[in-house]
Image (tube, grey):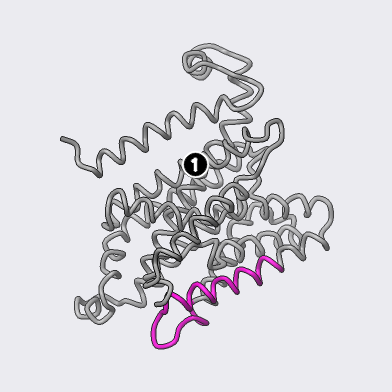
Amino acid sequence: MLSRRWLSFIVVSVLLAGLFFWAVNTGGIKISVLALYKGLFIEYNRDVEIIFDLRFPRIFIALMAGGALAVSGVLLQAVMKNPLADPGIIGISAGAGFFSAAAVMLFPALFFFIPMFAFAGGMVACLLVYTLSWKSGLSPLRIILVGIAINAVFTGLLSALQYIGGSSSRNMINSIVNAGMTMKTWADVRMLTGYVLFGVTASLFAAGKCNLLALEDKTVRNLGVNVNAVRIIISAIAVLLASIATAVVGTISFVGLIVPHIARLLIGRDHKVLLPFSCLLGSFTVLFADTVGRTIAYPFEIPAAIVMAVVGGVFFIFLLRRSERIYGG
């Protein structure tokens, strides 16, 4: 008999495969699985070529961005010992978005280095959250309150750039703010792939350390582990994943909150299993939000960020009401 963990992996994988085909067929052109297979691997098909050039990049970007944000959320929650931590809520995504937008305006020739600027912005935001919320330790309540304040500051600065930038810069900033996935190309996919693969792989190597951080700091130190060094390394991996996703698809909040919470309910708290499952479930979540946004008001599109904001906001309130111990920490 299959264990609950394996069953969860299988169910989410099957759902993701079905969602992938739904996303491929969302739009004016519809195609069967057989025709898609033939068009990709056997013979030329004009409809398949259009889907391959226009829809596939968008789908793969949604999958990778969702996985990156979910893994980032798991890592931040492990480091901060706060199940309500999320790169969107505590300002990391906003910091990455602001630095990306500022780079576009000030150094348009350095467009291909935007992921680096995004990472720098995410690290600045993360450092501010740690510094301002530290008071004889990390308090879950202070982390959330300081994070919300940092998020508000960087979001305000990002919005200000929308009013002072030119038309080309404004379009780029709008895509960062509204999580635009339209008109993405294979170049965007290639740029995102390398960073995400590196970040997710690094997170899997850090899974054992994440399990240790669930213990008291004194206990971890007695095991010969440098707690501060571990926190810095894991935080850097989390910020990298969230920042790169933000640089490519924009700011999408609540993915790093919803997905890890559901994943823990399904498969438990062992990060060696939780991280890969959260990556898979995060991919499903963002692709689902993007596909729903494309279909619910067709032919108009609702950005994935808006879909996640509505769903995630309700979920966040539910968690706060259900977790008085966490909120009062």
Vertical position of residue 34 compared to residue 295: above or below: above
Asked if 17 appears above or below 208 in the picture, the reply is: above
Residue at the image point whose x is 44% and y is 65% from the top = 321
Residue ranking furthest to the top: 43
Q: How many labels does the image show?
A: 1
Residue 137 part of the magenta-drawn span: yes
Of residues 89 and 220, which is closer to you in this image?
A: 89
Q: In this orientation, which residue lies closer to the viewer: 134 or 50?
A: 134
**Mark 1 = which residue?**
63
Is 173 magenta? The answer is no
Q: Give the range drawn in magenta.
A: 130-156
Side (left or right) of 62 relative to 232: right
In the rendered image, residue 327, in percent from the top left (x then y), is placed at 43, 72
Q: Where is residue 291 in the image (x, y as percent from the top left)?
A: 57, 36
Quarter-wise, where is residue 328 in the image?
Answer: bottom left
Q: Position of residue 200 (x, y in %)?
A: 40, 52
Pick the front one: 144 or 118: 144
- Residue plotted at (41% across, 45% down): 281
Q: Where is residue 138 in the image (x, y as percent from the top left)?
A: 41, 79
Q: In which quarter of the image is the N terminus?
A: top left
Q: In which quarter of the image is residue 83?
A: bottom left
Q: Would you place residue 39 above or below residue 20 in this image?
A: above
The residue at the point 57 percent across, 13 percent down is 44
Mark 1, Cα crowd under 10 Å, few <14 / some 14-19 / many 20+, is many
Q: In which quarter of the image is the C terminus?
A: bottom left
Q: Which residue lies furthest to the front in this view?
A: 321
User: What's the amino acid at mark 1?
Assistant: Leu
Callout 1: helix, strand or loop? helix
Looking at the image, which residue sits at the far left?
A: 1
Residue at x-position 54% and y-position 50%? 311
